[in-house]
Amino acid sequence: AQSVTQPDIHITVSEGASLELRCNYSYGATPYLFWYVQSPGQGLQLLLKYFSGDTLVQGIKGFEAEFKRSQSSFNLRKPSVHWSDAAEYFCAVGIYNQGGKLIFGQGTELSVKP
Amino acid sequence: DTGVSQDPRHKITKRGQNVTFRCDPISEHNRLYWYRQTLGQGPEFLTYFQNEAQLEKSRLLSDRFSAERPKGSFSTLEIQRTEQGDSAMYLCASSPFGVGELFFGEGSRLTVL
């Protein structure tokens, strides 16, 4: 069965420090991978997506993610975190033969220290 | 605003009452999805439509839940005889055909007392 694991429930980083959020997936075919961000009480906003090609993908707000097939991972990174990045981050895998639905991980909550 | 809109944003109800949520997708999107999200968890898939056809329902969608998309445009999610365990954020999303970005609404938060 398809699944997504985000090992870190909560991460705290200092403003200006680098960030890496981990994501591992289980999927039998070529994965379509996504990172979304959710602020409290809000819907989800797409940060970036990977479909094929270059395994390092750039997204909005200075985020990037690297697809590593050998490790079944799609980790999200940012070189310098801003206080406004505090939010919940979700990794997801897209299921092509099931209507393109997304299967989400449980999320990682990011706190930013001044 | 041409994004996905959901109504109401917040609903408080007593156990046993029926509630209905509405979702208006982005107009040119033919796929519409419903998800449920509880505190501290990621969104869980409930069901999806392609145009007016409901093509998949999750095991999470008990027989108290029903979803419709009568003309392939807006959709409704009805919960009958609500239970406290139904308290959650109900998210709607839409997308064009194929695997791509899902565009989410801001959600409808349900509290069952």
Image (cartoon, rainbow, N blue to C red):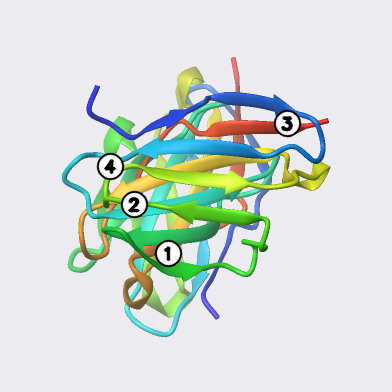
Residue A38 place in picture, x, y as percent: 49, 34
The structure residue drawn at horizontal position 21% and vertical position 54%, both measured from the top left corner, is B96
Marks 1 and 3, how far apart at CA: 29 Å
Check if mark 2 and mark 4 are on a common chain: no
**Same-subunit check for callouts 4 and 3:** no
Q: Say if B84 sits above or below B11 in the image.
A: below
Q: Which residue is mark 4?
A: A59
Task: Tell me the tag on residue A93.
Answer: 1
Does label 1 lie on the same chain as label 2? no
Between disc 1 and disc 3, the foreground one is 3
Circle number at residue B19: none
> Does residue A30 appear to the left or right of A114 in the view shown?
left
Q: Amino acid at mark 4?
A: Gly
Q: Which residue is mark 2?
A: B70
**Distance between mark 4 and mark 3 Cα atoms:** 35 Å
Which residue is at the front of the view, B63 or A62?
B63
Q: Position of residue B104 (x, y in %)?
A: 39, 40
The Cα atoms of the two marked residues, 2 and 3, are separated by: 27 Å
Q: Which residue is mark 3?
A: B111
Asked which secondary structure carries label 1, the reply is strand
Compared across the picture, whether A66 is left or right of A43 comes to: left
Q: Percent position (x, y) of residue B12?
A: 71, 25
